Image (tube, rainbow, N blue to C red):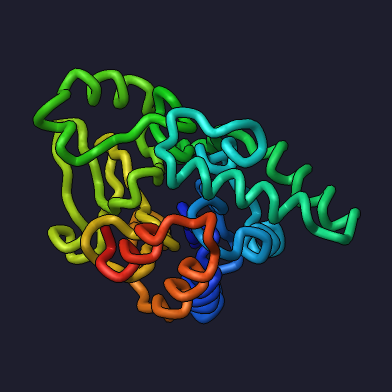
Amino acid sequence: MFAIISDIHGNLEALSVVLADIRQRNITEILCLGDVVGYGPNPRECLDLVMETCQAALMGNHDFAVFYEPYNFNTGAESASYWTRRCFEQESNAEVRSKRWRFLGQLPPRVKTDQYVALHASPRRPINEYIFPDDIYTNPGKFVAMFERVDRLCFVGHTHVPGVFLEGPDFYTPDELDYRFEITDEKAIINVGSVGQPRDRDPRSSYIVVDNNQVEFVRLNYDVKTTVKKIEAVPELDAFLAARLLDGR
């Protein structure tokens, strides 16, 4: 049994609730699919928790943006990336500062086992390509290319919209699956959703638990108002980043 989290985005309140739930389930193995930082007000604390609790973590596009440079970001995302970078650079403890930068710089783009492949974005472009539910109607050829790169099972994040893509192509929300998906021989790409910035009109944190051939989608309430106030208190963080948390958009 193991847990997969993704897209924390500097949201300490959300991450703390998710990690507490994982501990309560006696799960000791956690995989993070990236975007630990970006957008949110507590990048240093969230990165420290991921370093402490996750057995593996991957490079997301916002992690990449902070360590290297923002690529194809809107103004709000770019500003948040530069602010996050300054947070890391202003750490007074040189050893802690170096440890964080080293961790960010060494994040791999994917991890592969005999059972699955995991990455932040897509099997084709693991750091920055989105796989949207609407793509099954608007770009079916994209899914052919995706599933050609998947042996059986693939875990992703990036869109902040949880659910299961099948080779049909089909997409099923956690609601439609009654929050459980049975892994079979059929190829599947599973989006685990976002811990710190859900975008499926449900403001609750999202992560998954994998137990043998069963995937459980977990949603948890957290103190979103505290996170909103923290974002609003940072001039470099766009107010929209706070408002969207209340609606899960």
Return the x and y of residue 120 as percentages of the image width and height.
46, 40
Query: Going by the image, does 121 lie left or right of 27?
Result: left
Q: Where is residue 222 in the image (x, y as percent from the top left)?
A: 41, 78
Q: Which residue of the protein is positioned furthest toward the right in this rendering?
A: 94
Q: Is residue 123 visible?
A: yes
Residue 15 sits above or below residue 112 on the image: below
- Name the residue located 90 percent from the left edge and 54 percent from the top edge: 94
Q: Nearer the viewer, residue 234 or 96?
A: 234
| Quadrant hosting residue 132 | top left
Residue 58's spot in the image, x, y percent? 57, 42
Q: Is residue 236 left or right of residue 125?
A: right
**Left or right: 42 in relation to 102:** left
Q: Residue at x 78, y 43 (%)?
A: 102
Report the number of discs: 0
Position of residue 226 relative to residue 6, above or below, is below
Name the residue at 61% across, 51% down: 83
Q: Is residue 248 above or below residue 95?
A: below
The residue at 33%/34% (across/down) is 130
Q: Quadrant of the C terminus?
A: bottom left
Which residue extends farthest front? 235
Quadrant in the picture for residue 242: bottom left
194 or 113, which is in the foreground?
Answer: 194
Classify residue 131 by image quadrant.
top left
Q: Which residue lies furthest to the left in this view?
A: 137
Find residue 69 and report its horizontal and vertical position in percent.
60, 31
The answer to whether one can see residue 22 in this image is: no
